[in-house]
């Protein structure tokens, strides 16, 4: 039995792409271990769907106990206003611009910003811990889930003579959290140094693959973030106004402030935001006084499709402020489609390819709250709305499902295992 070590820079509780891959490999005869963060309240070792989660910490056992069990109880909680930080203002409206133009090159400060070097040092330390633990297990194949776990996968592969795979979930240095040219240079150097040692590179969409192929000069395997196929959920009888659902992370530059602001331009549709993240307090602040905006609690990943069916349409308002967002194909697109929801989406290249190509919804300028409102009302009133939702689900049944996508990953692994 071939051993596979996966490395991911999180605690592995909400990373659906990594979970699908680990479960797929375990179901097909591979022995799989997933190396990730150890956080307070989580088990260090956890069996899940046929694979083993190995949570590790850069700290010693004694330091971890002192920090988590002693100091955490002694720390005084921050005042609520300090935790929230500055609250967002209502975004201004603008005349719609469609399709959305590509983002301008970012003008980043040259030097590291406060905290960035400390963060990169932490990345190096936890990667070293993962590599030490995984190397003792002697895997045959090592796979990094993004650049921030690649050093651990590379070091383990070098030690054990294993095959090396990189799965790039993002266009790494084109993300909002990369805020200085020094940080861009750090990741670009790491990518240039380690990717030539990879036997395979995967990514999440065709636009990402085209960028990476040009940057890295090699073939890239596209593995979309499709869901496992399931029959169309039963939609509960609607009570009251129709619901437009955003389901996912409340993160930066996802257009959620503009989505909430769009509620001021129409009263026909209720906007529901279901999720979690650092932006929640700001969204609650913007939603005050609006009776057509709801903030819902997140739901377990296993319920996301069924719960999405509680809505009448899905919304994807990502702002094209960086190349990563401009070219993205988010998980929620496939979640909405599988739930049988028509989709209102930002007019970005790959979202347009799905929405117009599969004829499942409409597009808007995510910087324009009034245009978002126009699209939601237009989609609700569209006599083809239910047919668009049915086509979305049928497209998942026909093509955009994990059962289809997973064959490409298994073929890749089979070829590497035979080398």
Image (spheres, rainbow, N blue to C red):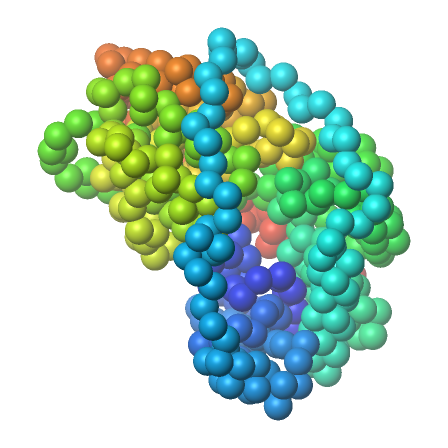
Please name whichever residue, 232 or 282, is drawn nearer the observer in this view of the structure. 282
Whether residue 354 is visible here, answered yes or no, is: no
Left or right, 385 with reference to 343 = left
| Frontmost residue, 360 versus 243 | 243
Q: In the picture shown, does residue 249 fall above or below 393? A: below
Compared with 129, 259 (above or below) is: above
Q: In this view, does 283 lie above or below 162?
A: above
Residue shown at 69% from the left, 79% from the top: 133
**Quarter occupied by the N terminus:** bottom right
Horizontal and vertical percent for residue 405? Answer: 53, 44
In the image, residue 200 sits, relative to residue 295, either above or below, namely below
Residue 212's x, y, as percent?
A: 75, 38
In the foreground, 90 or 190? 90
> Residue shown at 47%/36% (left/top)?
88
Which residue is painted at 50% across and 75% down in the image? 75
Residue found 30% across the figure and 36% down from its top? 288
Q: Can residue 182 be seen in this view?
A: yes
**Residue 302 coordinates in the image, percent (x, y):** 34, 56
Pick the residue in front: 322 or 380: 322
User: Which quarter of the rendered picture does the C terminus lie within?
Assistant: bottom right
Tally the marks.
0
């Amino acid at each position: 039995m071939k051993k596979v070590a996966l490395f991911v820079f999180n605690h592995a509780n909400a990373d659906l792409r990594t979970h699908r891959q680990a479960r797929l490999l375990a179901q097909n005869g591979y022995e799989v271990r997933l190396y990730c963060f150890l956080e307070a309240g989580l088990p260090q070792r956890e069996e899940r769907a046929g694979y083993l989660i190995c949570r590790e910490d850069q700290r010693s056992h004694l330091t971890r106990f002192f920090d988590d069990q002693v100091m955490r109880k002694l720390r005084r909680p921050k005042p609520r206003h300090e935790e929230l930080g500055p609250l967002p203002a209502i975004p201004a409206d603008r005349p719609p611009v469609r399709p959305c133009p590509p983002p301008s090159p970012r003008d980043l400060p040259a030097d590291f910003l406060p905290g960035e070097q400390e963060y990169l040092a932490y990345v190096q330390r936890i990667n070293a811990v993962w590599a030490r633990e995984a190397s003792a297990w002697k895997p045959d194949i090592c796979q990094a889930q993004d650049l921030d776990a690649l050093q651990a996968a590379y070091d383990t592969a070098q030690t054990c003579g294993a095959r090396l795979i990189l799965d790039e979930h993002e266009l790494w240095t084109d993300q909002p959290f990369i805020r200085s040219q020094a940080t861009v240079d750090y990741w670009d150097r790491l990518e240039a140094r380690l990717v030539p040692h990879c036997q395979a590179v995967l990514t999440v969409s065709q636009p990402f693959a085209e960028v990476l192929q040009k940057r890295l000069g090699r073939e890239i395997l596209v593995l979309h973030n499709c869901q496992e196929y399931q029959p169309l959920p039963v939609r509960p009888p609607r009570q009251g106004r129709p619901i437009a659902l955003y389901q996912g992370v409340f993160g930066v530059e996802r257009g959620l402030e503009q989505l909430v602001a769009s509620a001021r331009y129409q009263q026909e549709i209720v906007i529901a935001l279901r999720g979690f993240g650092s932006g929640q307090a700001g969204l609650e602040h913007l939603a005050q006084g609006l009776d057509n905006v709801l903030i819902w609690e997140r739901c377990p990943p296993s319920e996301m499709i069924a719960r999405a069916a509680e809505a009448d349409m899905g919304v994807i308002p990502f702002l094209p402020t960086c190349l990563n967002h401009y070219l993205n194909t988010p998980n929620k697109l496939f979640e909405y489609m599988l739930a049988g929801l028509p989709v209102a989406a930002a007019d970005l290249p790959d979202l347009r390819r799905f929405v117009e190509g599969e004829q499942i919804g409409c597009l808007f300028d995510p910087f324009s709250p009034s245009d978002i409102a126009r699209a939601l009302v237009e989609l609700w009133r569209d006599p083809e709305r239910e047919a668009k939702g049915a086509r979305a689900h049928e497209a998942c049944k026909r093509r955009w499902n994990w059962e289809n996508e997973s064959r490409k990953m298994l073929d890749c692994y089979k070829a590497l295992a035979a080398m």
